[in-house]
């Protein structure tokens, strides 16, 4: 899906950020898979949800980075993102929160994310294929769901073009809040069941 968006996004991406975040996320992903094999998935959902809610709350309270993050900080963001991808396929929040705290413009934020998701998606597909392999059922389901995904991407692009920067940031933060709450609720439901 991000392959379709890559030609539009890549020229506007922040490649300095991606140069540190993407490789570090590749290193973090196997750690996330290992954690998932060791710990309760429901408990991990709750921890991730609390982490996302905490970070979003800090940004909603007005926190902004005074300068661009150092390379080591960007690598740390990437590593956490990779760990989260390995655990839950949810690599976006660390990078989204970093980009929002950096006060980058909405085009750079979105373009950097699309480009990053392309790289981590390609790595994840390759990694999982060699680690456990895909079944034919998974391949067919992916192909069946692809048209809906493509339609969703085009709708998202159309909405993005009409959205002002302030609205974009607020909407992004509230989507992350919803994601954090959903992770906690799903984790609690799994622990109770």
Image (cartoon, grey):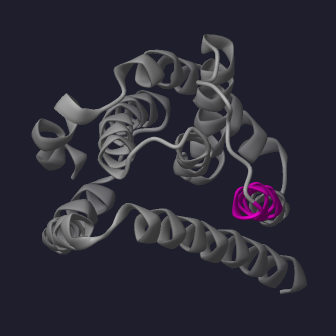
Q: Main secondary structure of the magenta part?
A: helix
**Position above or below: 108 against 144:** above
Q: Is residue 56 magenta?
A: yes
Residue 20 in the image: state x and y as whole percent.
51, 16
Residue 23 locus on image (x, y percent): 49, 17
Give the image location of residue 138, x and y in percent. Answer: 32, 59
99 or 83: which is nearer to us?
Answer: 99
44 with respect to 146 (left or right): right
Asked where in the image residue 118 lies, by quadrant, the reply is top left
The range drawn in magenta is 50-61
Residue ranking furthest to the right = 192
Q: Examine the image and state in which quarter residue 119 appears.
A: top left
Identified at 35% across, 21% down, the residue is: 15
Query: Can residue 30 be spotted in the picture?
Result: no
* Residue depicted at 57% across the width and 38% down the height: 102
Residue shown at 39%/29% (left/top)? Answer: 123
Q: Is residue 67 above or below residue 110?
A: above
Relative vertical location of residue 127 with respect to residue 134 in this rendering, above or below: above
| Closer to us: 2 or 158 | 158
Residue located 56% across and 53% down the image:
90
Q: Quadrant of the C terminus?
A: bottom right
Q: Position of residue 47 (x, y in %)?
A: 83, 58
| Left or right: 165 in relation to 77 | left
């Amino acid at each position: 899906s991000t392959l379709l968006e890559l030609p539009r996004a890549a020229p506007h991406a922040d490649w300095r950020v991606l140069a540190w975040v993407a490789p570090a996320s590749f290193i973090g992903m196997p750690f996330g898979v290992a954690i998932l094999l060791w710990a309760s998935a429901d408990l991990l959902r709750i921890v991730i949800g609390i982490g996302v809610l905490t970070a979003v709350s800090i940004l909603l309270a007005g926190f902004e980075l005074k300068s661009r993050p150092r390379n080591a900080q960007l690598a740390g963001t990437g590593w956490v993102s990779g760990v989260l991808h390995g655990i839950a396929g949810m690599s976006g929040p660390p990078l989204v929160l970093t980009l929002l705290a950096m006060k980058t413009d909405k085009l750079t934020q979105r373009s950097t994310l699309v480009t990053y998701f392309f790289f981590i998606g390609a790595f994840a597909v390759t990694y999982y294929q060699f680690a456990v392999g895909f079944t034919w059922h998974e391949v067919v389901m992916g192909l069946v769901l692809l048209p809906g995904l493509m339609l969703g991407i085009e709708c998202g692009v159309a909405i993005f073009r009409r959205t002002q920067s302030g609205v974009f940031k607020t909407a992004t933060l509230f989507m992350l809040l919803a994601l954090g709450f959903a992770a906690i609720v799903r984790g609690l439901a799994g622990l109770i069941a």
